[in-house]
Amino acid sequence: MRNPDSKLVTKMRAGDVTAFDNLYWRYYDVIYRNIVKLTKEPVAAKDILQEVFIRMWEKRNEINFEQPNWIFTISFNLSIDYTRKRLREQALHKKLLVAGEQMAGSGSRYEEHYQLLKNAIEQLSPQKQKIIRLCKLEGKTYEEAAAELQISRHTVKEYLSAAMASLREYVREHAGKVSGIGCIV
């Protein structure tokens, strides 16, 4: 049995924007509802929905439209990616909250450590600062950081390694100015 959207898909593959619009309006509502079911976040679901259709247009010559539920597969995968990212962010926030509570008792010493690390990061190049922020503070993978910065995974890994070495060296050189500090990096 032939897919009822096959004519629209054929036209869309040829670059017909009207065919794309017809597919968009045919699936918009049902895809949105499915994304909301998966993410439980209506605002994020709108962003994911847009990404589904952007991806559909950009990869229109690669997607196997004969596969049943092809658009649901795209939306499912993007929803799962989003959910995983949110879980990583939540875990990072919990770790920071716990660390903050533990450090609260040590007050000024924590501030000294924080300032030392902040100063060390400020000594890095802007690109290395971005990579530290993405990989160490936001918990992103090398692949995610590479995609965001539009550089290779290998470059992210190399920059992060060099940045961490620079931070350790900076802390070693300036640790004497902060009481009770070992190596915090």
Image (cartoon, rainbow, N blue to C red):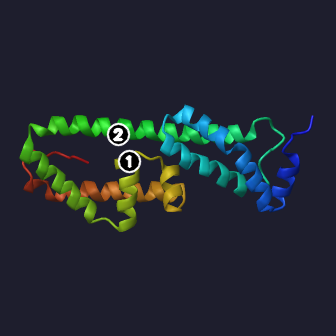
Mark 1 element type = loop
Q: CA distance from mark 1 to mark 2?
A: 7 Å
Residue 145: horizontal and vertical position, in percent?
Answer: 47, 54
Q: Amino acid at mark 1?
A: Glu
Identity of the residue furthest to the right in this view: 1
* Residue 119 badge: none
Q: Which residue is located at x 32 percent, y 39 percent?
A: 93
Residue at x 57%, y 39% (from the top left corner): 79
Left or right: where 118 falls relative to 32: left
Quadrant of residue 3 within the rendered picture: top right
Taking 20 as reference, is 185 left or right?
A: left
Can residue 157 be seen in the rendering of this structure? yes
Q: Where is residue 94? Give x, y as percent.
A: 30, 35
The residue at the far top in this view is 37
Nearer-the-camera pick, 135 or 138 = 138
Q: The N terminus appears in which quarter of the rendering?
A: top right
Q: In x, y percent, where is residue 99?
A: 22, 37
Q: Tell me the tag on residue 138.
A: 1
Instruction: Identify which residue is drawn at 83% across, 51% down.
Output: 9
- The three-letter code of the residue at mark 2 reads Leu
